[in-house]
Image: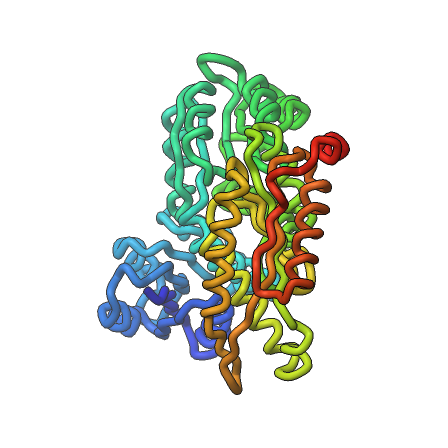
Amino acid sequence: MQQHVLIIENGEGNLELIAKLVRRAGLTPVGATSLTEGKARFSQNMPETFLCAIVAYSLPDAPKGEAIDFTVESFIPTIATTESLDSAIRDKVLERDVVDYIPKENSQNYDYLNRLISRLEKNKSTGVVVVSTNRVLRSKTVSLLQRHNFIAFECLTATDAMQCLSEHKNVRLVITDNTLPDMTGTHFVASLRKAFSKEQLAIMGVAGGKGMLMSAYFIKSGANDFLRVPYCHEEFLCRVMQNVEYIESVEEIRRVANTDYLTGLPNRRHFFYMVTVQHQNLSEDHALALIDLDFFKSINDTHGHDAGDIVLKAMAALIEFYFPDEIISRFGGEEFCIYMPSTPLKEACERLDDFRKVVEAEIIQLPKSDIKVTCSIGVSGAHTQRVDKLLSLADKQLYAAKNSGRNQVKCEPPDVPQQEQASLL
């Protein structure tokens, strides 16, 4: 379903400027320059298609925030805008259940608005745990988070929070006060840090009174951030956004570092890491396969490198589909690798030969023609637990498959001499 953003702005210039930001975020702007027109445009679309509304405080037919009241009462997350930073108007805006308040006085505020729009969609799958026995503080914090579309979890104790984290893998931030029934907030933060690094989970401490040192106690215990209560609505949400975006940035860096840019498969470095982790709890039965596309250079020479990229992506998609539970990788060039834990060599070879037949039958669509490709596969098995030896054996079998005419699977012989077995261990 295409997501819309309702924009009610005072003037065509403001409307078009914000509409550009909305389009940049991949969303569809639904614009109006008055409350009357905004109500009409809203009624023309299904309410559930609106991700949020961006509404000016002052409009010709709604000079005192009536348009904001309309969108809030229509259950649309609402971002209010004003022409300038005015404390009196700001207070009137924040009395309402708005997501945030943006004064349109400089370009940086528009950049913040752009980030905010993008976050509202991402937040639908982002969890935040709020830990406090203070019902008023907990309710206020959860309410603000839900306005931003976060999935908010309420916990009264550190133990409950740890259980919540174990059940919900989408949690990126924990907000905790210092007075908990089962331990202090700083001890809770320290215990969280034993289980989660700062790159995996952000932690924000909140506290009132207690002197000025409480922030230092939280930070030294492992918190990413601290906020004193009572806190400012806008500062709270800015800090939440910054902490969540930090976690997401680290996740994105890791994803890029571990992923082949063309096919989206794990790269060689990440493959070695994953297999090494898997090796810690493996039975003796396992197999490793190297897959190489036949005559790939001729595809590039005949059809061009863009066609070669299409073929590699098609091959990667087939591997992902037929080996969903295995560790797979693009090793480089036209070579792919599959590690099959707890799989006897004979079973692995049968599955890989079935896959080879699938590749041979596949028709790959290129811009100017359709082509078919074949692959050669070398497989090694359970004679060693060392990844480098498995690769070396599979590479020898791949070489044999190439030399024997290609488009075939060559498996490591099951009866490797004992002397050779000993040298591989």
Query: Residue 416 at x, y = what percent?
Result: 66, 38
Q: Nearer the viewer, residue 281 or 75?
A: 281
Is 66 left, or right, of 99 in this rendering? Answer: left
Residue at the top extreme?
182
Residue at the right extreme?
423
Quadrant containing the N terminus in the rendered view: bottom left
Residue 195 lies in quadrant: top right
Q: Nearer the viewer, residue 344 or 164?
A: 344
Is 359 left, or right, of 60 in this rendering? Answer: right
When the figure is inspected, residue 318 is found, relative to residue 224, above or below; the finding is below
Question: Which residue: 43% across, 24% down?
Answer: 163
When the figure is inspected, residue 389 is found, relative to residue 213, above or below; the finding is below
Question: Which residue: 56% across, 38% down?
Answer: 286
Question: Which residue: 40% across, 25% down?
Answer: 155
Quadrant containing the C terminus in the rendered view: top right
Query: Residue 136 at x, y = what percent?
Result: 38, 28
When the figure is inspected, residue 98 is found, relative to residue 197, above or below; the finding is below
Question: Which residue: 47% across, 59% down?
Answer: 117
Query: Residue 273 at x, y = what percent?
Result: 66, 40
Is 48 left, or right, of 263 in this rendering? Answer: left
Query: Residue 235 at x, y = what percent?
Result: 54, 43
Does residue 216 appear in the picture of this structure?
yes
Residue 50 lies in quadrant: bottom left
